[in-house]
Amino acid sequence: MDTNLYWRHLEAEHPRAEAFCRRLTGDRDEGDDLYQDALVRALTRVQTLRDPASFRPWLYRIIVNTYRNRCRSPWWRRRIPLTPAVCATLAGDDPAAAYATRRWLERALAALRPDERALVTLFEIDGWGITELARLFRRPEGTIKARLARGRRKMRTAIENHLPARGRGTPETEIDENGVEYAVRPIKPPQA
């Protein structure tokens, strides 16, 4: 594949790929850095792409691998700030609910390994299908479904560990420090 064709394909995929990088890292600046690193890596490997029709999974594979490599680096290089991104809100709107939701999502995603986080983000947020993900990760569709289920389970457990324990029975509601109401499921005690 020549570089002119690379830039044409990238132009069509640019907004989605950039947004994916930002969601993957949880920070705009870190996401932009990841995206730039992945684009440089992709440009140096453009000759390895034989089928231009598979540009999208090829690019996302490079992004995911770049993200994985960043997460494997020493802790001071992989530190991701947990501050919420600045939300575009109308004057007078209270962004507390959006911030609270963002914090819960960050807690859930923090429980995942980098490859699991990429998989869940692509499927749940970006709307990729199982077939596309199987092609991207080079795994059978059944494996992708199982990994998604495991990732969701890890996220659910991470959230449940932050919720206060309640009595047994039906879910109750809890109001957090920002006044956001959410359902609380009782955590089952370990059985002996």
Image (cartoon, rainbow, N blue to C red):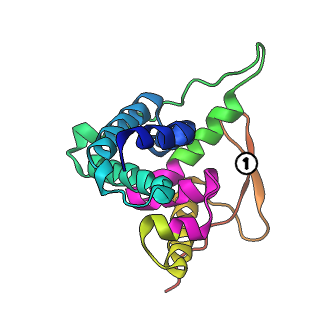
Q: Which of 57 and 163 is in front in this view?
A: 57
Crowd rating for badge 1 (residues with CA inside 10 Å; few <14, some 14–19, many 20+): some
- Amino acid type of disc 1? Glu
* In magenta stretch: residue 116: yes
Q: Which residue is most to the bottom?
A: 192
Q: Is residue 101 visible?
A: yes
- Residue span colored magenta: 107-133
In the image, taking residue 4 as reference, residue 166 lies left or right, namely right
Residue depicted at 36% across the width and 40% down the height: 3
Residue depicted at 43% across the width and 60% down the height: 51
**Image height of 153 relative to 141, above or below:** above
Q: Mark 1 points at which residue?
A: 174
Residue 144: horizontal and vertical position, in percent? 52, 73
Q: Which of 179 and 96 is in front in this view?
A: 96
In the image, taking residue 171 as reference, residue 146 lies left or right, namely left
**Image height of 152 relative to 41, above or below:** below
Q: Main secondary structure of the magenta part?
A: helix
Q: Nearer the viewer, residue 12 or 81?
A: 12
**Image height of 169 relative to 61, above or below:** below
